[in-house]
Every structure is written in C-alpha cells, then in structure tokens.
Amino acid sequence: GSMHVEVLINSALLALGLALESFMVALANGLRNSNARILRGCVLALLFAACHAAALAIGFAAVRAIADNVALIERWLTWIAVTVLAMLGVKMIVEGIGTCRGHAVKTAKRTAEYFVQSAVASFDAFAVGLAVPNYSVVEVALCAGIISAVIFCFYFVGFTAGKKFGVRFSRYAALIGGLVFIGVAVEIAAGAV
C-alpha cells in the first residue's frame, strides 16, 4: 500500500542523513589508515551498519513499549522525533562548518575506538527508531535493512576515498547530511499538523 511506499521513501532519506555522517567518519578513518587493506574497510562498514540497525530497533522497541499504553504519548513522540531530527541536522551542519575551520572529524586507530565511534554514530539511528513509532514491525525491519545497506555502502566508499583523497569532502558531507535531517524533520512535522 501507499504506507509502504512512504516507509521506503522516509527510510531512504533517513538512511542518507545517517550515512553521510558515517561517510565522514569513514573518510577520516581512511585517511589515518591509508595503508589499510580493503578488508578492514569492509569489517568497519559492517560494524557501523550493524550498530545502526541495532540502535534503530532498540529505539523503536522502547517507544512501542510505552506507546502501547497511551495514544497521547504518540503525539508527543512525533514532536520529540521532529525536535531530535532537527537537532541532529543542526549538529551536523555545525560540525561541517567546524570542519571548514580545520577541526576534522575525530579518527580512530585502535579497535576500541572503532566500537565507540560506531556506538556514538548510531545514537542518531536510535533517535530515528524513536521517530517511527507508528511503523509496523515489518516496516521497521525494512527501514533498518535499508539504513544498514546504505550505511555499509557509504562507509565503505568513504573509507576507500579517505585512503585516496583525504578529508576535503567531509565538510560537504556534513552539511548535506544535516540538511537531509532537517528536511525529514520538516516532513514529519508537516504530516503531524
């Protein structure tokens, strides 16, 4: 039905916003690991994708546990979602502008740092999970699948590109990602009004 189309489009947009942040992190990591093997990029991309899918599922489950009780909470959650997404967008744009001034995205060298990076980056996915309380479980699985696939590709490409070119693109990625998130927030708000 049309709901599924909407889910697909929203998921793709959210995935894009999340993936651009992953892309920046991957670029920075690629830079620091310019002699790393392609396999490493694959493993890191998988780690990032898995963390995002898990975070999204946890956010969704948390909301569902509450939302089963009260319809009013859902109304609140819609606006929480809008606020969270808008703030994520602003945060990314500010980071992007910060990058212009030479504060690069923090890069990771040790394995533990990669895990922390993945977890922190996937907070955004947790927020997205909070933003889709009225999706069915199937739709959330679909959303998580799309987001994971997109993030895997972006991270892998970012890591490979970082190995080659350096961090020149990262601020544009941040600005675009931020705008995408704000766009999604506006779209959800418009639907809620």
Image (cartoon, helix red, strand yellow):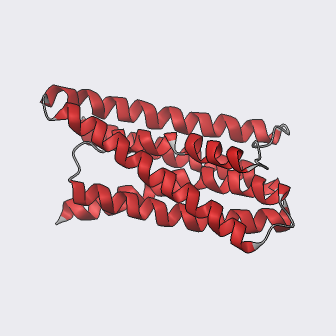
Q: Position of residue 140 (x, y in %)?
A: 30, 55
In the depicted view, which residue is nearer to us: 93 or 31?
31
Residue 23 in the figure: left or right of residue 105: left
In the depicted view, which residue is nearer to us: 115 or 150?
115
Q: Which residue is depicted at the point 58% across and 40% down?
A: 120
Residue 44 in the figure: left or right of residue 83: right
Q: Which residue is depicted at the point 61% across and 49% down?
A: 21
In this view, 6 is above or below 104: below
Q: Position of residue 48 (x, y in %)?
A: 57, 55
Q: Position of residue 25 (x, y in %)?
A: 69, 51
Q: Which residue is depicted at the point 35% across and 48% down?
A: 57
Q: If the image is split into quadrants, where does the N terminus sit? A: bottom left
Residue 112 in the figure: left or right of residue 73: right
Q: If the image is split into quadrants, where does the C terminus sit? A: top left
The furthest residue to the bottom: 38
In the depicted view, which residue is nearer to us: 66 or 39?
39
